[in-house]
Image: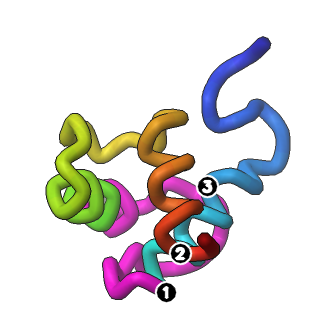
């Protein structure tokens, strides 16, 4: 099944960055790359949504983030 996010073009991470930006959690550059600011934005989102705080884009964080941003 591969790694999460997928091993391809990191579309999941780019979508997550778009969602974080839309929700007010500044992820930095929207480029599909886990840069300096994205982990902090993920942690802030995880705290705000009572998720396990890792700063990583796991499948639970992604599905919660996607639902919150794009409903």
The residue under label 1 is 22
The residue tagged 2 is 69
Q: From the image, give the main secondary structure of the stretch colored magenta.
A: loop
Q: Above or below — where is 59 with respect to 67?
A: above
Q: Secondary structure at mark 3?
A: helix
Q: Nearer the viewer, mark 2 or mark 1?
A: 2
Judge from the rendering whether residue 12 lies leftward or rightward of residue 36; answer left or right: right
Q: Secondary structure at mark 1?
A: helix
Q: Which residue is mark 3?
A: 13
Where residue 29 appears, as percent x and y from the top left, is 52, 79
Residue 32 picture quarter: bottom right
Q: What residue span does the magenta drawing correspond to?
A: 22-40
Query: In the image, is residue 62 above or below residue 27?
Result: above
Q: In terms of secondary structure, where does tag 2 sit? A: helix
Tell me how far mark 2 sits from mark 1, CA to CA: 7 Å
Please tell me which residue lies in front, 11 or 45: 45
Position of residue 14 measured from the top left corner of the image (x, y, whole percent): 65, 64
């Amino acid at each position: 099944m591969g790694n999460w996010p997928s091993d391809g073009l990191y579309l999941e991470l780019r979508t997550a960055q778009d969602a974080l930006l839309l929700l007010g959690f500044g992820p930095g550059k929207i480029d599909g790359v886990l840069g300096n600011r994205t982990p902090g934005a993920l942690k802030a989102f995880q705290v705000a949504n009572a998720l396990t705080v890792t700063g990583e884009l796991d499948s639970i964080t992604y599905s919660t983030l996607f639902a919150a941003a794009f409903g």
